[in-house]
């Protein structure tokens, strides 16, 4: 047993060394120092949006360094625990060490996934849009279930979110919703969630209790930054203003504050209604429109390269994940084959295993191409 643990602990150290080489703790320390200086500036909160961005980046960078440092300490402690168990011939302590080994390995796997996020926009914050598809009221309800799932996932990780737009369906659920996840690498992490999601269950809206299959689409784009230079001529945009709908405070349904932008050349439509003023909604809508145009431009460039190379196969299937609640319970990703039976936990935001499997799958596909 001691020999097995020696090999396993050696493998843990090798994995951590690889992660450290990519994460570059010295660079993280330098970044923390830079952000700490910015956070201590006396005029920081003159611009609340920038202040929140700085303090959030500081906290997340500190946590990233802390995860690497604490992982080193956990491996050291595990080695000591194993030595104590072997010397004392203590089966209970040895079992404790085995449990800690598996916990460390799982956490290391999660850290290792972060090193795979090296795409051009992977480090960006994310804008997520969920739209109900085929399936009527069940699809609208499913869209709302997915939105809650992602918001709970973000909450579990301490990632700030902001709902930008919600379009409610007539009977229940959502026609569509758009929200931001304000954390570094949110786009790279959540981009593997993009695609068509399918739900199979006994419909709570069918008085005959029949099984219903419904669909929802998830779109993930990187948040635009000023350096991206996405210029949109005014004559390419149609602007419509309308009265906000759905639940809200006193300002909802009283003024034409909601804004809908239509990009005429592409047909992309972005609606925003969750801010109080028309100016704020228009600015938010423009930011999301620019983000979508940015990712579309990159997708066109990638598709053109594939065409020139004689490979025009789509990167994503029409359906990437199934959530089955009846006649059995299972959530299965059709790309990675990863599946779990605890559907309640998944809908409560426990989707890290799916995301990690998706990121590894994507890296494997990119390497093959």
Image (cartoon, rainbow, N blue to C red):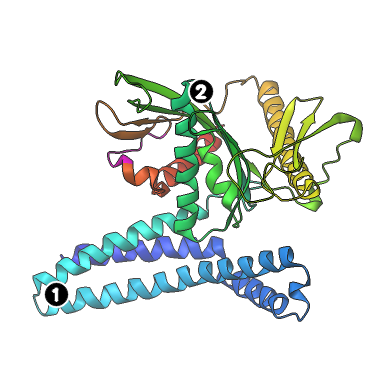
Q: Which quadrant of the figure contains the C terminus?
A: top right
178 relative position to 68: left or right: right
Q: Quadrant of residue 37?
A: bottom right
- Residue 318 image label: 2
Say which of marks 1 and 2 sits in front: 2
Q: Which residue is mark 1?
A: 86
Q: Nearer the viewer, residue 329 or 115?
A: 329
Residue 150, compared with residue 160, is above or below; it is: above
Q: Quadrant of residue 167?
A: top right
Residue 219 shows in the view: no
Q: CA distance from mark 1 to mark 2?
A: 53 Å
Using a 10 Å C-alpha cutoff, classify the residue at mark 1 as few (fewer than 14 neighbours), some (14 to 19) or many (20 or more).
some
Residue 48 shows in the view: yes
Residue 11 in percent (x, y) is at 34, 61
Residue found 38% across the figure and 66% down from its top: 13
Residue 212 in percent (x, y) is at 37, 21
Residue 184 on the magenta span: no
Secondary structure mostly taken by the magenta-highlighted segment of the chain: loop
Q: Secondary structure at mark 1?
A: helix
Residue 39, compared with residue 138, is above or below; it is: below
332 relative position to 366: left or right: left
Residue found 50% across the figure and 65% down from its top: 20
Residue 249 in percent (x, y) is at 62, 51
Q: Which residues are magenta?
A: 336-343
Q: Nearer the viewer, residue 1 or 229?
A: 229
143 relative position to 211: left or right: right
126 relative position to 154: left or right: right
Residue 338 on the magenta span: yes
Count up the numbered dots.
2
């Amino acid at each position: 047993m001691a020999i097995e643990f020696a090999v396993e602990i050696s493998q843990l150290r090798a994995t951590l060394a690889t992660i450290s080489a990519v994460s570059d703790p010295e660079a993280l320390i330098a970044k923390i120092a830079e952000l700490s200086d910015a956070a201590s500036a006396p005029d920081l909160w003159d611009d609340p949006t920038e202040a929140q961005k700085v303090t959030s980046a500081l906290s997340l960078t500190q946590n990233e360094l802390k995860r690497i440092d604490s992982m080193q300490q956990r491996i050291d402690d595990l080695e000591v625990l194993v030595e104590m168990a072997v010397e004392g011939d203590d089966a209970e302590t040895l079992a404790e060490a085995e449990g800690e080994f598996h916990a460390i390995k799982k956490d290391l796997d999660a850290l290792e996934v972060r090193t795979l996020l090296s795409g051009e926009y992977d480090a960006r914050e994310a804008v997520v849009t969920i739209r109900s598809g085929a399936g009527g009221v069940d699809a609208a309800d499913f869209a709302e279930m997915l939105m809650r799932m992602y918001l709970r996932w973000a909450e579990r990780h301490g990632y700030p979110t902001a709902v930008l737009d919600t379009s409610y369906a007539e009977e229940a659920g959502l026609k569509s919703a758009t929200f931001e996840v304000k954390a570094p690498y949110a786009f790279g992490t959540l981009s593997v969630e993009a695609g068509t999601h399918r739900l199979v269950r006994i419909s709570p809206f069918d008085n005959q209790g029949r099984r219903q299959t419904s669909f929802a689409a998830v779109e993930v784009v990187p948040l635009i930054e000023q350096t991206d230079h996405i210029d949109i001529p005014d004559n390419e945009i149609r602007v419509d203003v309308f009265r906000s709908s759905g639940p809200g405070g006193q300002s909802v349904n009283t003024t034409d504050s909601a804004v809908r932008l239509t990009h005429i050349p592409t047909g992309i439509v972005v609606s925003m209604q969750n801010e109080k003023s028309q100016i704020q909604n228009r600015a938010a809508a423009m930011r999301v429109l620019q983000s979508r145009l940015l990712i579309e431009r990159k997708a066109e460039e990638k598709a053109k390269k594939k065409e020139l190379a004689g490979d025009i196969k789509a990167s994503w299937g029409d359906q990437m994940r199934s959530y089955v609640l009846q006649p059995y319970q299972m959530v299965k990703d059709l790309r990675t084959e990863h599946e779990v039976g605890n559907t309640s936990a998944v809908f409560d935001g426990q989707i890290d295993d799916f995301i990690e499997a998706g990121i590894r799958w994507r890296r494997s596909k990119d390497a093959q191409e």
